[in-house]
Image: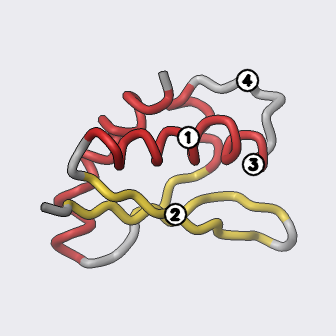
Amino acid sequence: VYSWRIYEIAQSWLKECNKNNKPVLWHLTDIKHALQVPDTYRYQEIRRRALEPAIIEIKKISNLEISFSPKKKGRSIVALEVFVKEFK
């Protein structure tokens, strides 16, 4: 379920990431809304249950490579820097 949504979002970001060679900033609230994860999920749960398995699956069956790094505000994670690239 998460793989398909992340794949669609990554496809829309592909041109922007390749053109600017910069990651896209994806806020945690937007992640929760786009993936429809429960509001009780914290970043660690979203990463472990939704993001990491979906990125592995996308890499196996498509030509996209997705990587991300957390952006912090103080001690809490508020967004992800997502970089999408296409490999052949």
**Mark 3 lies on residue:** 43
- In the picture, measured across the screen, residue 8 lies left or right of residue 44, that is left
Q: CA distance from mark 2 to mark 1?
A: 13 Å
Q: CA distance from mark 3 to mark 1?
A: 14 Å
Q: CA distance from mark 2 to mark 4?
A: 21 Å
Amino acid, disc 4? Pro
The residue mark sitting in front, 4 or 1, is: 1
Is disc 1 surrounded by few (<14), some (14 to 19) or many (20+) residues within 10 Å? few
Amino acid, disc 1? Pro
Q: CA distance from mark 3 to mark 2?
A: 13 Å
Disc ID at residue 68: 2
Q: Pointers 2 and 4 in contact (CB under 8 A)?
A: no
Dot 3 or dot 1: first in sequence order is: 3
> Can you give x and y, in whole percent of width and height, for residue 41 in the image?
79, 34
User: Which of the 4 image quarters holds residue 58?
Assistant: top left
- The C terminus sits in image quarter: bottom left
Query: Residue placed at 54% from the left, 29% from the top?
Result: 35
Please state which of residues 4 and 22 is positioned toward the viewer in this rendering: 4
Q: Secondary structure at mark 4?
A: loop
Is disc 4 surrounded by few (<14), some (14 to 19) or many (20+) residues within 10 Å? few
Disc ID at residue 38: 4
Disc ID at residue 53: 1
Which residue in the rendered view is the most extreme toward the right?
75
